[in-house]
Amino acid sequence: MTESLFYKRAALYWANVPATVDGVLGGFGHISEIDLDGSRKFLDEILALKNPPDTKLALDCGAGIGRVTKHVLLPRFEKVDLVEQDEKFLTSAKDYIGEDYGKIESVYNCGLQNFKPQKTYDLIWCQWVSGHLKDYDLIDFLERCRISLNKRGMIIIKENIATSKELEYDEDDSSVTRPIELLEKLIQEAKLKTVKKDIQKGFPDDIYPVHTLALIGLE
Ligand SMILES: C[S@@+](CC[C@H](N)C(=O)[O-])C[C@H]1O[C@@H](n2cnc3c(N)ncnc32)[C@H](O)[C@@H]1O
C-alpha cells in the first residue's frame, strides 16, 4: 500500500469515529479506567526518580479528545500541549477536559508524520498512536521529539504489542501492531534508550498486551 493511502485510510477511519472515550478507544471504553490507573502509577514512579523530568510542560501526541491529558498529564504538569490530526477530536477536547482546559497552552491539528515541535518539553506522551506511523516516519518523529526534550526530559510510548514476531496490519483503522523487537529497533535508530518499561496489568486476555516504555535521548 502506498504511504499516502496508509495515512488517508487512518484519517478517514478516525473522522467517522464519535468524539467519546469509547470512540477513541475503538469500542474499548470500559478499559479506560484501568489504563489510566496504570499510566498514573507509571508516571508517578518516573516523577519520583532521583533526577526526574521537570513538570512545566508536557505534550500529548495523538491526543484524541484529551483522555490522557485530562486524567494523567494535567494533574501533574503546569501546562500541556496537544497534537492530534482529527480536528473534531480537538474541538471536543475543550468540553471533555472542562475547567482545566485553561492549562492547555497550544493545540496542533497535524499528523505526527508532519509534526515539528516548536517548543521544548519535559515529557512527551505517545499512546496508541505510534502504529499509525510508517517505520521511517516513526523514527523521524521520535528523533524530532528527542531533540525537543528539556534536560532530564522523557518520551513515553504506551502501545499495543504483537504477540507473534510478525508486524500485523489492521485494515479497519489502517494501523500496524509491531512486535516489541521491531519497536525497540526503531527506538534505537532514533537514538533513544529505554530507562523503564512495564506491561499494563488488568486488561482483558483477548486484547494485545500493552507495553509502556520511558525513553531518554542517547546524546
Ligand atoms: C486509539 S486513539 C488514542 C487517543 C489517545 N492517545 C488516548 O489514549 O485516548 C488514536 C488517536 O490517534 C490519532 N491519530 C491517528 N493517526 C494519527 C497521525 N498520523 N498523527 C496524529 N494523530 C493520529 C487519532 O485521530 C486518534 O485520536
Image: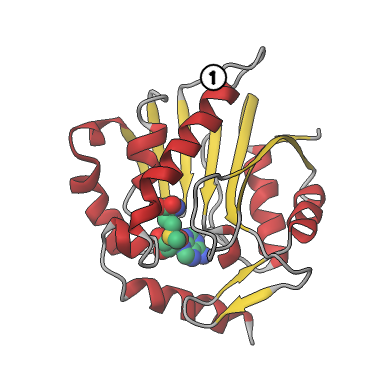
What's the residue at 62%, 43% (across, down)?
A: 145
Please identify the quarter of the rendering in which residue 101 is found: top left
- Depth check, front residue: 100 or 207: 207
**Amino acid on which disc 1 is placed:** Asp
Examine the rendered structure and indicate whether residue 68 appears above or below residue 79. below
What's the residue at 30%, 30% (across, down)?
A: 103
Q: Position of residue 16 (x, y in %)?
A: 31, 76
Name the side, left or right, on which 151 lies relative to 5.
right
Q: Position of residue 108 (x, y in %)?
A: 40, 51
Label 1 CB less than 8 angstroms from ligand 1: no
* Crowding at mark 1 (Cα within 10 Å: few <14, some 14-19, many 20+): some
Q: Position of residue 198 (x, y in %)?
A: 64, 40
Examine the rendered structure and indicate whether residue 174 appears above or below residue 28. below
Q: Position of residue 82 (x, y in %)?
A: 40, 45
Name the side, left or right, on which 87 lies relative to 35.
left
- Depth check, front residue: 184 or 110: 184
Quadrant of the image for the C terminus?
top right
Question: What colour scheme governs how the chains and residues are painted in the rendered image of this protein?
Answer: secondary structure
- As helix, strand or loop, the secondary structure at mark 1 comes to loop
- Depth check, front residue: 49 or 10: 49
Q: Which residue is mark 1?
A: 54
What's the residue at 66%, 12% (across, down)?
A: 50
Name the side, left or right, on which 186 lies relative to 60.
right
The quarter of the picture showing ligand 1 = bottom left
What's the residue at 63%, 85% (across, down)?
A: 2
Quadrant of the image for the N terminus?
bottom right
Examine the rendered structure and indicate whether residue 89 appears above or below residue 45. below
Which residue sits furthest bottom? Answer: 1
